[in-house]
Image: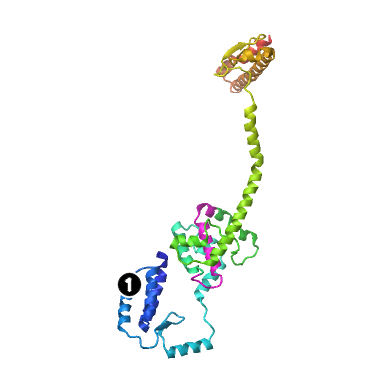
Amino acid sequence: MEGNRDESEKCISIAQKCINAGAYEKALKFLNKAERLYPTQKAKDLLDHVKKLNESTPDDTGGGAEKNDDGVCHRKGSHSREATDSKQTSEPKEKDYTEEQLTAVKRIKKCKDYYEILCVEKDASEADLKKAYRKLALQMHPDKNKAPGATEAFKAVGNAFAVINDPAKRKKYDMFGPEEEQRSTRSQREYDYSHGFEGDISPEELFNMFFGGGFPSAGVRRQHRSYSRASSRSSDEGSATLLLQLAPILLLVILSLLSSFFVSDPVFSLNRTDKYSAQRKTQHLHIPYYVKQDFTSNFAGDLRRIERQVEEEFISNLRQNCWRERSYKENMLWRARNYADAKLYERAQNMETPSCDQLQKIYS
């Protein structure tokens, strides 16, 4: 409603001119319109005043009043009709838009970026953006502005606000700028309106969000429906492409899940767990290992091979631990010599290597 205040004031101004010219019916029409757009006490007072004047003034002139192209009302009559007919035959038909409206449309078509369209700085706040959008959307709406290119300009204003008012899109836009600017080699050109609407809603829906209805534009809706259908087709194609790209990954995940069902548990463990709770020792090296409770009944005939695997795994672990112990001890000795640290050298000399000792015992 706040955005319709200017329109309401214009209607009141026209109505005042009609009252001065004695065209009370026209004045009532414009005052009622002003009340619908933005109710004010001034409009109500004028309505009451005009109704009283209309009731007290007889209509004996052969017809009320008419409004000329400049918005000024005059009494109807034979002289007025003759002047109008003479004017229509001698002069070309007036345009249904003003030079100011045409200039505003041309300005937008010459803009190079969204900030210039909205007439705001790059550090403009959300409140500044909304204020600028309200003003331009009302000015450029194709059902109010009949100048050539008004529909495209209205769409450009919606595009600019949809991008700049979204923090993520605004950041991306500030980094890369409009794609057309990167591709173009011309220094002077008009803004390209051929691309689709860049917001999540149509320009008309965005307009209605701010003004609660207003001017339904069939042209804008047709353009948006066409773009929506194209976007839907593009989205379906993108989904199919994404599914094809993810197919190998999904196949690997499914295979890994299936393989987990067919991989059996190990026969033994070198550490005690809840599942491997029964302790045994190998016959050759007497290495302790742990098995399940049903080990004897399931693997009695394969005991020799299993114990060989136990000893190989145990010795392999000892070798790895022995290598780490020796490396740590040698590094400590090197540091002691390098820094001439007698205490560190003595501690390194006395460092034990239990894995190496146990491995040496097995070898001997």
167 magenta-colored:
yes
- Taken as a whole, is the magenta stretch helix, strand or loop? helix
Find numbered disc 1 in the image and state the secondary structure of the residue it sits on: helix
Residue in the foreground of this view, choosing between 149 and 318: 149
Find residue 278 and report its image quarter: top right
* Rendered view: 311 above or below 257: above
Q: In which quarter of the image is the N terminus?
A: bottom left
User: Which residue is found at the position 43% from the left and 58% from the top?
Assistant: 127
Number of numbered discs on residues: 1
Find residue 314 and report its image quarter: top right
User: Which residue is found at the position 41% from the left and 67% from the top?
Assistant: 4
| Residue 337: image location, x then y, percent | 61, 20
Find residue 246 and report its image quarter: top right
321 magenta-colored:
no
Residue in the foreground of this view, choosing between 327 and 323: 323
| Residue 61: image location, x then y, percent | 37, 88
Mark 1 crowdedness (10 Å alpha carbons): few <14, some 14-19, many ≥20: some
Q: Mark 1 points at which residue?
A: 44
Is residue 136 visible in the rendered image? The answer is no
Residue in the foreground of this view, choosing between 10 and 235: 235
Question: Which region is colored magenta?
Answer: 143-171
| Residue 207: image location, x then y, percent | 48, 62
